[in-house]
Image (cartoon, helix red, strand yellow):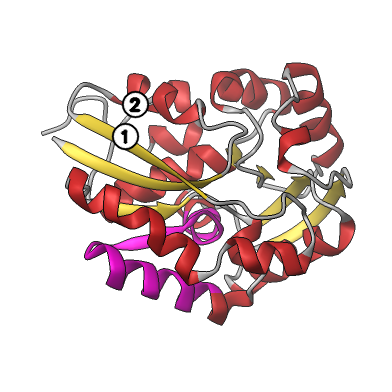
Amino acid sequence: MTALGFLYPGHAAEDDYPRAEQLLGSDIRVDLVHTDIGEDAHRVDALLAMGDADRLAAGVGELRRAGVDAVVWACTSGSFVRGWEGAQEQVRALARTAGTPASSTSFAFVHAAREIGARRVAVGATYPDDVAALFADFLATGSVTVTGMTSSGIITAAEVGTWGEAELFALARAADHPDARAVLLPDTALHTLAHLPALEKELGKPVLTANQVTVWEALRLADRRVNAPSLGALFTREPIVQV
């Protein structure tokens, strides 16, 4: 059994994680702990506070008791807002507290884009422009170039969590760019796991979404590789028959 641990801020699209567990197979367990979100705002000061080390450490004990093999901070904006070095320190502190390998959704996007060979990407952000720009800067530090970006200017994760299929597809279509090898949708408050194959068919290219890459990153840290086409092109890099 491989046990994957996630720290998820507040409540929005956390039901993507039990869905992922169902799609990955019977020998993978997903454990999710909600962290205190503080002020629900896509604003730099609020996002810095959301990812504070003490807030994250408060949720790690439950994951340690569950015996997880890896921990991922399932928040994009609450990690990239610190910049590359700050986000690295955030996950180093998380790893020390958890006693396991650790990462965050921001690093998951960089690693996933490299995995599928997408060094040029388009971004569909739910965030305000200034926060979305920080994500583009983070990707650039990881040698991933943003060829085009759209931002929806939404302030709260709670509002993003109410979005359905129509809003999701509209965001992805608006973000797409001819030069992009993949489209990235970076908000973990956005429900996406039920729509990945249809999104990729619609755009004709890989789509990387926050909750999808977060789960993939946890598997990577736990040294598990899974073929699960229902979770998008990112999960088709391994042979169907595995040892």
Q: Residue at x 35, y 62 (%)?
A: 102
The magenta-colored residue range is 87-111
**Helix, strand, or loop for circle 1?**
strand
- Residue sitting at x 22%, y 65%: 99
Q: Quadrant of residue 101?
A: bottom left
* Image quadrant where residue 44 sits: bottom right
Relative to 103, residue 8 above or below: above
Where disc 2 sits, the SS reads helix
Place of residue 171 in the rendered image (x, y in percent of width and height, measured from the top left): 81, 33
Examine the structure image and report whether residue 35 is included in the region drawn in magenta. Answer: no
Callout 1 amino acid: Val
Majority secondary structure of the magenta segment? helix
| Side (left or right) of 175 relative to 90 | right
Whole-percent x and y of residue 150?
A: 86, 47
The quadrant of the image that shows the N terminus is: top left
Vertical side of 36 occupied by 3: above or below: above
The x and y percentages for residue 147 are 79, 56
In this view of the protein, can residue 139 be seen by the observer? no
Return the residue nearer the eye: 123 or 8.
8
* Residue under numbered circle 2: 21
Give the mark count: 2
- For the C terminus, the image quarter is top left
The amino acid beneath tag 2 is Glu
